Image (cartoon, rainbow, N blue to C red):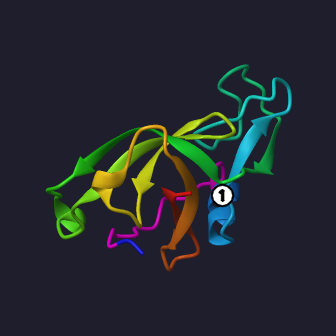
């Protein structure tokens, strides 16, 4: 488990299906019904073609580390959580998501490593998606 804070996200009607999925331990992403683009950040329209018809589908939960940074001195509620990793993970479905890589020695991470999603419960009906080595 990570020592990172787990703040509850702001949920709105566009992102509700995504956050409902996290509460169930599932990573779900909107897919455009017209052009098949996998949409990130979750929203109700396709940023690629403008279509408003999207279908929410389960993602594999796997990806690779695209880029990362180790934070050794945090601020605010993250002050005592250091060191922690802020990373871009490229999901197997295509999108790159900004997240944390947890449950590992930050100095052992490498770009290109396989990771899988884990969920940290916020205690408010949602969970934060984070990743650990696969």
Q: Secondary structure at mark 1?
A: helix
Query: In the displayed structure, would residue 94 be above or below residue 130?
Result: above
Magenta includes 9?
yes
Q: Of residues 109 and 48, which is closer to you in this image?
A: 109
Write down the quadrant of residue 5 in the picture. Answer: bottom left
Q: Quadrant of the C terminus?
A: bottom right
Horizontal side, residue 104 vs residue 62: left or right: left
* Residue beneath the point at 42% across and 75% down: 1
Task: Point out the stretch of residues depicted in magenta.
Answer: 3-16
Can you give x and y, in whole percent of width and height, for residue 21 in the image?
A: 69, 63
For the point 79% across and 49% down, the residue is: 57
Looking at the image, residue 36 lies above or below residue 12: above
Q: Which quarter of the picture shows residue 45?
A: top right
Residue 99: where, in percent of width, then height? 44, 50
Magenta stretch: residue 78 in it?
Answer: no
* Residue at (17, 58) in percent of width and height: 74
Main structural element of the magenta stretch: helix, strand or loop?
Answer: loop
| Horizontal side, residue 98 vs residue 60: left or right | left
Q: Which residue is tagged 1? A: 16
Mark 1, residues whose alpha carbon is within 10 Å: few (<14), some, or many (≥20)?
some
**Residue at the top extreme of this rendering:** 49
């Amino acid at each position: 488990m990570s020592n990172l804070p787990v703040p509850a996200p702001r949920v709105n009607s566009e992102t509700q299906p995504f956050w409902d999925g996290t509460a169930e331990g599932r990573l779900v992403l909107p897919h455009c019904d017209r052009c098949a683009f996998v949409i990130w950040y979750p929203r109700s329209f396709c940023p690629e073609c403008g279509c408003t018809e999207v279908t929410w589908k389960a993602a594999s939960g796997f990806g690779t580390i695209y880029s990362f940074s180790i934070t050794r001195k945090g601020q605010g509620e993250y002050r005592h959580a250091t060191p922690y990793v802020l990373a871009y993970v490229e999901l197997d479905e295509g999108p790159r998501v900004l997240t944390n890589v947890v449950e590992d020695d930050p100095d052992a991470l490498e770009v290109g490593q396989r990771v899988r999603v884990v969920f940290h419960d916020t205690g408010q009906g949602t969970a934060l998606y984070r990743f650990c080595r696969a």
